[in-house]
């Protein structure tokens, strides 16, 4: 089968070169030229104990999409932060490497982190209250 050149292919958007609606590159999260951050909702949060600086895994709904395995990280004496889901592998030299599974637009990063961290803090507060209620004293 011979491959058709770009100029000889039928126009899927209508007859002729200029008829019909053509797709345009529209940046996600924009409306009328202004950027809009989608709503973020933590739909699942799993608190983690005894895993170094890893404190929790979160599943976050970003608009209609749910993304699993955001991580809440808190190193000793440092502020907590949120890491996007990532894959890990070992190099032939035995070094552990990590790479993000998705890239977020810059303007989404802080609102998403704020949402996840607020849910994590609330879950921690509730877990502490539950432990106090169960044991009858402070944790």
Image (cartoon, rainbow, N blue to C red):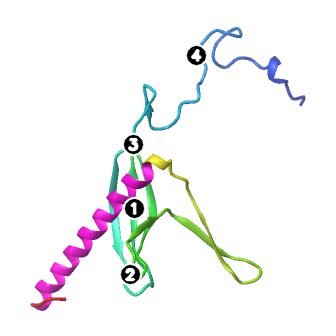
- Give the mark, 4 or 1, whose residue is nearer the N terminus: 4
Q: Is residue 123 left or right of residue 24?
A: left
- Give the mark, 4 or 3, whose residue is nearer the N terminus: 4
Indicate which label's residue lies in the foreground, 3 or 2: 2
- Give the mark, 2 or 1, whose residue is nearer the N terminus: 1
Q: Position of residue 79 (x, y in %)?
A: 37, 72
Mark-to-mark CA distance, 3 and 2: 31 Å
**Dot 4: few (<14), some (14–19), or many (≥20) neighbours within 10 Å?**
few
- Give the mark, 3 or 1, whose residue is nearer the N terminus: 3
Point out which mark residue 34 bears.
Answer: none
Indicate which label's residue lies in the foreground, 3 or 1: 3
Mark-to-mark CA distance, 3 and 1: 18 Å
Q: Which residue is mark 2?
A: 77
In the image, the segment drawn in magenta is: 108-136
- Give the mark, 4 or 2, whose residue is nearer the N terminus: 4
Q: Quadrant of residue 67?
A: bottom left
Q: Which residue is mark 1?
A: 59
Single out the residue that lies furthest toward the front: 77
Mark-to-mark CA distance, 4 and 1: 37 Å
**85 shown above or below 78:** above
Q: Position of residue 119 (x, y in %)?
A: 29, 64
Residue at the image point whose x is 59% and y is 24% from the top = 23
Q: Which residue is mark 4?
A: 21
Q: Quadrant of residue 45?
A: bottom left
Residue at the image point whose x is 69% and y is 81% from the top = 95
Indicate which label's residue lies in the foreground, 4 or 2: 2
Residue at the image point whose x is 32% and y is 57% from the top = 115
């Amino acid at each position: 089968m011979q491959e058709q050149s770009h100029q000889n292919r039928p126009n899927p958007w209508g007859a002729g070169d200029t008829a019909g609606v053509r797709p345009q590159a529209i940046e996600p999260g924009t409306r009328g030229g202004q950027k809009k951050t989608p709503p973020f909702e933590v739909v699942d949060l799993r608190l983690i104990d005894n895993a170094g600086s890893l404190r929790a895994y979160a599943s976050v709904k970003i608009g209609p999409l749910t993304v699993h395995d955001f991580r809440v990280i808190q190193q000793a004496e440092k502020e907590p932060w949120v890491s996007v889901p990532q894959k890990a592998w070992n190099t032939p030299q035995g070094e552990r490497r990590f790479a993000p599974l998705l890239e977020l637009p810059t303007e989404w990063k802080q609102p998403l982190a704020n949402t996840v961290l607020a849910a994590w803090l609330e879950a921690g507060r509730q877990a502490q209250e539950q432990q106090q209620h169960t044991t009858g004293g402070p944790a």
